[in-house]
Amino acid sequence: VLATWRLSLLAPKIPAKVETTFNFLEIRALNSHPDHQVIIDTDKSGYTLRFESREHLNHVVSHINFALSRIFSNSIFAPSICHSDSDLSEGSRKYSPSSETSVETQRACGGFSETYAALCDYNGISCKEEVQWDVDTIYHSQDSREFNLLDFSHLESRDLAVIVASMAYNTWFTKLYCKDLRIGSEVTEQVLHTVSKSSSLEEITLENAGLKSDFPQKMATALSENPASVIHSINLAHNSLDNQGVSSLIQQVCRLSKGLRLLNLSKTSLTSKGVVSLSQGLCSSDEYSNSLLHLDLSKNPGLLSGEDGSNFYLFLSQPNCLVHLDLSGTDCSVDSLFGALLRGCCADLSFLNLSKNAFSHRKVKDTLPLFRQFFSSAFSLTHVSFASMKLPPDVLRAVLMGLTSNPHITDLHLDISSCELRSAGAAVIHELFPRVSSIATLDISDNGLDADLLTVLPALSRHPSLKHLHLGKNFNIKNRVLDEVLQKLVLLIQEEECALQSLSLVDARLRSRGTVLVNALGSNTCLRKVDLSGNNMDDIGAKMLSKALQINTTLRSVTWDRNNTSAAGFLDVARALEHNFTLQYMPLPLSDIGQAYRSAPEKTEQALTK
């Protein structure tokens, strides 16, 4: 009896009973002989079958051949198990998927569901119809090439392992994605099997997947067994990995045809010793200089501290095509870095995150020209972050001076939040910011600016390119001065030439005095988005917001939470929303809802429903 993926042998007697059965994947060799005889060798046994006619023999061999070709999607790795004389192979061709009657082109997602069903049968587990339905319907309709394991996170580890194994010979899917889902050894083993066999897999993401430390070494071995691999993007972030294994993996990927485009080793316990071998791997081949676009080594404390970091700076100083570089939280000495960036990364670098690092203050004065030169000659920058480190005023001055004379950059996002700028930094912004035309987004929140906002805000007003401004956590000032600052802020957003589209005042703790700003939103015509969370404005703030929303027609997004809003305040806002037809996004203020619900559950529910 020939079933879809299995052959069963029954003795010719009644009642019928299956004597033996095996999945076609268990076959190791199938040889045909004269007199319509065929010998089948499987993992466990051997069988000699004699048929009544050549046609019967052809039918069996062709059925097995056809089934295997569907399981392996005509992959170059499909095992060649059928050996026969020439007449037989001619006969079997009419069933082959490579013939004109092939349905290969019509199979959803490269026939994934059939491979999956065959592997379930082979492993003796039930085939989950929901997996087949999701792939054939959802993935297929979205033309998705990324297989996301999170779609099946509710299944057992054994089921997930078979799903991953089905990708090994699939030619449709090019990406395997798994984040914040701990995968066991069964699944990891099949990931490695897929890496060693697939000729289509290009990107692999196993972020925070609970990988064992020896995974990179095993992956390097799997890649070495697969000369046809086209993998070019590897994300193993948030797994504790072995440094030596990472080094082996880098060297192995270096030998692949497409080179490495993306490498994410964020929070992988990489040490300064690991970065030496990583740097040597990166420097060892021109492939990296011509292919590596995205490099993330963030959240590895101590990684770039000391002498070992100089090896990495050597790679950065060579001409390369890096577009995205994240070195946040690596104890990188920021001032030592810019000489290397200037030499190697000026042309293509777009995203640069250096937050949570430090300046070695002895060298700062010597490196100021490098900062200025880099920011004046960088060609493609769109995002730069120095957040959460003490930024010397001289460095800020060099950065802004560089940007002033840079004709190439527009729409830059500059994040200098939590940089302890205070009065000295405020003076630099006041002096230089009006001359910078390339910054579209400026984040200066949490800098202890306080009363110095009186000098900062005029520098930001009427700025032609500034579209997004983050000012939160800067308002630790007495009431009289706070009123003055808020008045200046109101003037800034009321200016006719104001180009601002979004304003964030998160955790500014403006209290009820902030209502003057909320009031001003009513007649404002430039802002599209405001975030006023964490200001404890009480119900009076909610009432002013409701009045503003009834007449404002330009705001598209309002975020309002942690403002001590009670059920009464929510009712005011709800009534306003009934008259506002332009606001598109207002997330639920979960913190205030919880508080209001505890004191007046029915009224709060009524307000939220409204």
Image (cartoon, rainbow, N blue to C red):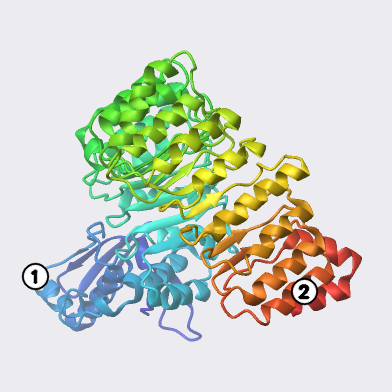
Q: Are marks 2 and 1 in contact (CB under 8 Å)?
A: no
Q: Residues within 10 Å of mark 2 (few under 14, many from 20)?
A: some
Pair 2/1: label in front: 2
| Residue 183 shows in this picture | no
Q: Position of residue 462 (x, y in %)?
A: 47, 53
- State the residue in front, 497 or 27: 497
Q: Looking at the image, tell me whether mark 2 or mark 1 is earlier in sequence order.
A: 1
Marks 2 and 1, how far apart in space? 85 Å
Q: Which residue type carries mark 1?
A: Ser
How many numbered marks have been drawn onto this rendered protein structure? 2
Residue 495 appears left or right of 518? left
Residue type indicated by callout 2: Asp
Using residue 422 as the reference point, say whether residue 117 is left or right of it: left
Relative horizontal placement of residue 287, taking residue 378 as reference (left or right): left
Coordinates of residue 387 in the picture (x, y in percent)? 53, 37
Residue ID at (58%, 63%)? 155
- Quadrant where the N terminus sits is bottom left
* Left-right relation of 130 to 563: left
Residue at horizontal 63%, vertical 76%?
551
Q: Label 1 belongs to which residue?
A: 86
Q: x, y (%) of residue 81? A: 24, 61
433 w.r.t. 369: above or below = below
Residue shown at 66%/43% (left/top)? 473
Q: Residue 156 at x, y = what percent?
A: 59, 60
Q: Residue at x 56, y 77 (%)?
A: 582
Secondary element at tag 1: helix
The residue that mark 2 highlights is: 572
Q: Give the camera-side residue of 132 and 101.
A: 132
